[in-house]
């Protein structure tokens, strides 16, 4: 997929908050080598390097555009960015922490990948991972309904993933326990107030719509966007705030998991 770093960071405060909440759960650890899988443009990976200045922090992403953006904008002595495909990447016993924020949901069968990485790390190594749990929210169900409509199903059949994109919290808890890790698993729904015209469309342009954009012509994609915009318009509540502005409440469920390997 063709990622746009500037589009992805358009809602940086909202997208970054789960990252910071995840960091807070591992703040007591003292890792010497951290891998951030799916680091994107590196704006949040920088926080890891700043929090643990004595650690080597390695940001990995499958998008050359994201890696180029990160290398061009961020320069810290303990931070590197490299191109890597998570489906073939291997962990090892030199890694003290795998950190991954909103990446694994893109990979079918990521639970098997995660199990493999857990087995490759040494005693006391940690994982801190977050995946979106909003695939049953209108932002995604409406998108799938439009894609499955008679108008679009011929071009978009099977392109968008459904609820099976991520597991339930209990699935990840079991996975960590079976691998010999502690299991701190929870979910949070952020009631995000987002501004602007068609804010839901603006949000998914940077993420969920990318598979659609990949397979449609430019003209078809713009038409699909318009169909989606109209279909999702009445699914989210506008809230009037002081000063005459209207914000849209965009609830966003996320699933978190933190574990440390037992001896």
Image: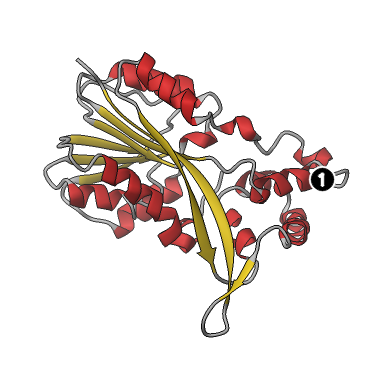
Q: Considering the numbered disc 1 on the image, is that residue within a helix, a strand or a loop?
A: loop
- Residue at image position (72%, 33%) is 158
Q: Determine which quarter of the picture holds residue 12.
A: bottom left
* Image location (x, y in percent) of residue 230: 77, 61
| Closer-to-camera residue (107/190) | 190
**Residue 36: image x %, image y %?**
32, 39
* 10 Å crowding of disc 1: few (<14), some (14-19), many (20+): some
Residue at the spot of label 1: 152
List x then y, in percent, for residue 108.
56, 27
Does residue 120 show up?
yes
Task: Indicate left or right for 209 with 53 as reference.
Answer: right
Q: Is residue 43 above or below residue 242?
A: above
Give whichever of 97, 251 is nearer the camera. Answer: 251
Do we see residue 213 in this rendering? no
x then y, percent, for residue 114: 41, 24
| Quadrant of the image occupied by residue 259 | top left
């Amino acid at each position: 997929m063709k990622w746009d770093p500037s589009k992805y960071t358009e809602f940086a405060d909202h997208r970054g908050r789960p990252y910071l909440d995840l960091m807070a759960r591992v703040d007591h650890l003292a890792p010497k080598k951290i891998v951030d899988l799916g680091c994107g443009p590196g704006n949040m990976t920088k926080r890891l390097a700043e929090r643990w200045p004595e650690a080597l922090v390695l940001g990995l992403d499958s998008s050359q555009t994201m890696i180029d953006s990160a290398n061009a904008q961020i320069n810290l002595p303990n931070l590197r960015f490299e191109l890597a495909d998570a489906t073939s990447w291997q962990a090892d016993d030199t890694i003290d922490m795998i950190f991954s924020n909103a990446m694994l949901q893109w990979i079918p069968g990521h639970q098997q990948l995660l199990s493999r990485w857990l087995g490759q790390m040494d005693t006391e190594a940690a994982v801190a991972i977050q995946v979106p749990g909003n695939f049953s929210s209108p932002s995604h169900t409406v998108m799938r309904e439009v894609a499955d409509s008679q108008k679009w199903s011929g071009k978009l059949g099977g392109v968008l993933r459904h609820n099976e994109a991520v597991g339930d919290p209990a699935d990840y808890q079991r996975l960590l326990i079976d691998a010999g890790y502690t299991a701190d698993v929870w979910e949070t729904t952020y009631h995000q107030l987002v501004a602007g015209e068609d804010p839901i469309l603006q949000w998914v342009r940077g993420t969920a719509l990318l598979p659609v954009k990949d397979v449609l012509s430019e003209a078809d994609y713009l038409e699909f966007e318009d169909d989606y915009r109209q279909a999702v318009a009445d699914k989210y509540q506008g809230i009037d705030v002081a000063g005459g502005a209207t914000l849209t409440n965009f609830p966003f469920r996320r699933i978190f998991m933190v574990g440390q390997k037992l001896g």
